[in-house]
Image: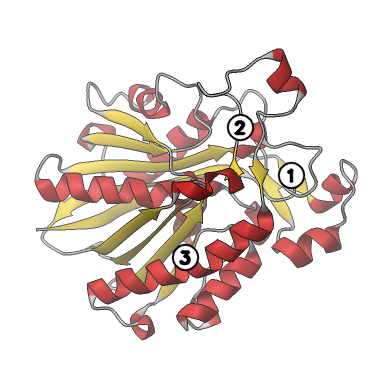
Amino acid sequence: MGVIVAGLGASLPEKVLTNQDLEKMVDTSDEWITTRTGIKTRRIAREDEPSSKFAIEAAKIAIENAGMKPADIDVVIVATVTPDMMFPSTACIVSSSLGMGEIPAFDISAACSGFLYAMNIADSFIRSGKYNTALIIGVETLSKITDWEDRNTCVLFGDGAGAAVLTRSDEEGILGIEVRSDGTKGDLLYMPAGGSRMPASMETVKNRLHFIKMNGREVFKHAVTKMPAIAKEVLDKAGISVKDVSLFIPHQANQRITVSTGERLGIDPEKVYSNIERFGNTSAASIPIAWWEAYSKGMIKENDIILLAAFGGGFTWAAAVVKWRRK
């Protein structure tokens, strides 16, 4: 018995925010942003567009792409750091909106590694025999927790959602997943206020503590070592050579991180997928959005080996190797 990825989907806001738009908002320039991040544009949700809107749209596409109906889903897992609200979970909103009935649905918080964490959980559920088919979603509306007065962070983030349907199969599709964390470095990428440690107050709002805070230099340093290391580990455990990888889809955090990770792994640049130029860093949504886009472009063929890797706040990091099985 194996587990395959039976369907993919994605959804993005219509609004596009360009580097030229940002030049009018903060002290920055298109050249400064492009050379340091590789980002040219990003999608931004409207005020009346919560994360669930994009999660539901991506889920519908993924379920249809899998040739299934919402009733075929046994469990829903949503990875996000920007849920609609503290509770109920965004997953419950998704499942109820799609008429899935009284199935289990829950959110997880693992920042940019969230989608691969969700894949790990879903894969384990299916292999244990607990469930047959799982819907996993990575969704973020990071624009809603971005400090638009902080030029070091506001240029980075975008909004959107990506989804995948995992199901039991006679074929083996998910060849391996590894996940890790290091909570000692949590203060290098975090949002200080809004939780039980620092509840919302006039003071926390005044001090702009409900926005993303990041030490970019330190995050970069750890990302370019942890991502290739765990990617190598998952390949080794799966018995797959780097040369056998058809496509590498890393978390779209920063183009310099993407290039460095690919080089450290020894993967040909043409096999490294990047769309950060158009969408920015969408955290938990970045890998499934890129995966759906690559699939839609016909870049993924039957039996192709796909390598996925992510690094994010927590710190968390993860990697997965998947053999594309659709027949």
Q: Quadrant of the C terminus?
A: bottom left
Can residue 223 be seen in this snapshot? yes
- Frontmost of labels 3 and 1 is 3
Q: State the residue in front, 118 or 134.
A: 118
- What type is the residue that disc 1 sits on? Cys
What SS does tag 3 mark? helix
**Relative to residue 192, is residue 174 drawn left or right?**
left
Q: What is the x, y in percent for residue 312? A: 51, 51
Q: CA distance from mark 2 to mark 3?
A: 24 Å
Mark 3 sits on what residue? Answer: 226
Q: Earlier in the sequence, mark 2 or mark 3?
A: 2
- Frontmost of labels 2 and 1 is 2
Mark 2 surroundings within 10 Å by alpha-carbon count, few (fewer than 14), some (14 through 19), many (20 or more): some
What SS does tag 2 mark? loop
Residue positioned 67% across, 25% down in the render = 47
Mark 2 sits on what residue? Answer: 192
Mark 3 surroundings within 10 Å by alpha-carbon count, few (fewer than 14), some (14 through 19), many (20 or more): many
- Above-or-below relation of 154 to 75: below
Mark 1 surroundings within 10 Å by alpha-carbon count, few (fewer than 14), some (14 through 19), many (20 or more): many
**Relative to residue 107, is residue 127 drawn left or right?**
left
Q: CA distance from mark 2 to mark 1?
A: 17 Å
- What type is the residue that disc 2 sits on? Pro
Q: Earlier in the sequence, mark 2 or mark 1?
A: 1
- Above-or-below relation of 300 to 13: below
User: Which disc number belongs to residue 154?
Assistant: 1
Can residue 300 be seen in this snapshot? no
Q: Are marks 2 and 3 in contact (CB under 8 Å)?
A: no
What SS does tag 1 mark? loop
- What type is the residue that disc 3 sits on? Lys
Query: Which residue is outermost to the top?
Result: 202
When asked about the image quadrant of residue 295, the answer is bottom left
